Image (cartoon, rainbow, N blue to C red):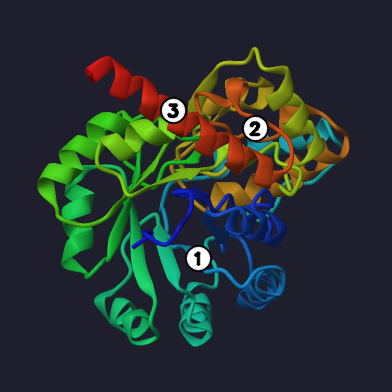
Amino acid sequence: MFEELRVPVLVAPMAGGPTTPELVAAVAEAGGSGFLAAGYLTADALGERIAKTRELTSRPFGVNLFVPGRKSDVDLSPYVRRIEEEARHYEAEPGDPRWEDDDYPAKVDLVAAQRIPFVSFTFGLPSTTDVARLHEAGSQVIVTVTTPEEAVRAVEVGADALCVQGFEAGAHRGLFVDDPEHPAGGEVYGLLALLRLIGSAVDLPLIAAGGIVHGADVAAVLAAGADAAQLGTAFLRADEAGTQLAHRKALAEGGRVTAITRAFSGRPARGLVNRFLTEHSPYAPSAYPQVHHLTKPVRAAAHAAGDPEGVNLWGGQTYSVAPEGPAAEIVARLKAEAKAAQERVTRRLG
């Protein structure tokens, strides 16, 4: 699927701002590719980002869609009261904890009409009808999976490839279903173990994601059976990324551990530990996107105040050694490091 890439590196679809048209285009022009994040956008806004990316590059790129889940029936009132108190720190008001489908049907219509080369899905499975529509449009369908069982189900709906996400990954876990009784939402697998298990269970091209920040990591997942590596945290400090200032500073400073939390969105996601995560994680319900909408204005106020203690500092476990600079230089560095790793292995094995 990605044989034509000069560098088997894909920039991850980091929703909420970090993955910009400029970032995707820069990585594509440098020999890789990437996915625009459709999450939290209207179909019209996504259409504008697709158009902008096409202005910047003629190379193929993808779009990632969030599959809407069932509305949670959990009582949100206790958490609403906590966030009301949190909002007072920033003289803000909490948002409306509403459920909505992220404009999903309209976005599927859009990517089909735009004939996007690669369409990936996170948080669940597209319908077989939507997969067929995308195939008719010439798109290849990729499903994000976190377990071998999810991989088998993705094959059954007609996926062309899988994005295999290890627990090391920053931001949201791509679980099909968030188990409220499990702190991480479900079974956790390290990336290399998951690649081995899924590679033994299905016969599809695999994209590896989770904790990949160095070229040696890229070489490792390719050796483990992946066809390409998807990197998010590695590009958060790229010049072209839309990462907000408080987030960039926290990433650059290092020193924080990471943890999985539902505190910001109602879905398990890995971020740098801060006050908000520490105080609210024990009480956060499994209720996405209601919790996301509830906390969004408060997080925006914290960003405006430049306070890293009140925002979601998404990042993978290896964030502290992720690079910064122009995206093209990051891609070139990853390629050189991967080649050096390949040479070390060759020498070691004779």
* Left or right, 234 with reference to 138: right
138 to 70, vertically: above or below:
below
126 to 326, vertically: above or below:
below
The amino acid on which the numbered mark 1 sits, given as a three-letter code, is Gly
According to the image, label 2 marks what residue? Answer: 313
Q: Secondary structure at mark 1?
A: strand
Foreground residue, 60 or 272? 60
Residue 35 pos. (x, y %): 53, 59
How far apart in space, not on screen, are marks 3 and 2 (Cα)?
A: 25 Å
Q: Residues within 10 Å of mark 1 (few under 14, many from 20)?
A: many
* Residue closest to the far top: 255
Q: Earlier in the sequence, mark 2 or mark 1?
A: 1
110 to 60, vertically: above or below:
below
Residue 222 pos. (x, y %): 32, 39
Q: Quadrant of residue 24?
A: bottom right
The amino acid on which the numbered mark 2 sits, given as a three-letter code, is Leu
- Note whether residue 189 is visible: no
The amino acid on which the numbered mark 3 sits, given as a three-letter code, is Ala
Foreground residue, 89 or 240? 240
* Left or right, 244 with reference to 290: right
According to the image, label 1 marks what residue? Answer: 62
Q: Residues within 10 Å of mark 2 (few under 14, many from 20)?
A: many
Picture disc at residue 122:
none
Question: Residue at the spot x=29%, y=73% of the render?
Answer: 127
Q: Quadrant of residue 277?
A: top right
Q: Residues within 10 Å of mark 3 (few under 14, many from 20)?
A: many
* Left or right, 155 with reference to 17: left
How far apart in space, not on screen, are marks 3 and 1 (Cα)?
A: 25 Å
Question: Residue at the spot x=28%, y=31% of the render?
Answer: 192
According to the image, label 3 marks what residue? Answer: 216
Q: Secondary structure at mark 2?
A: loop
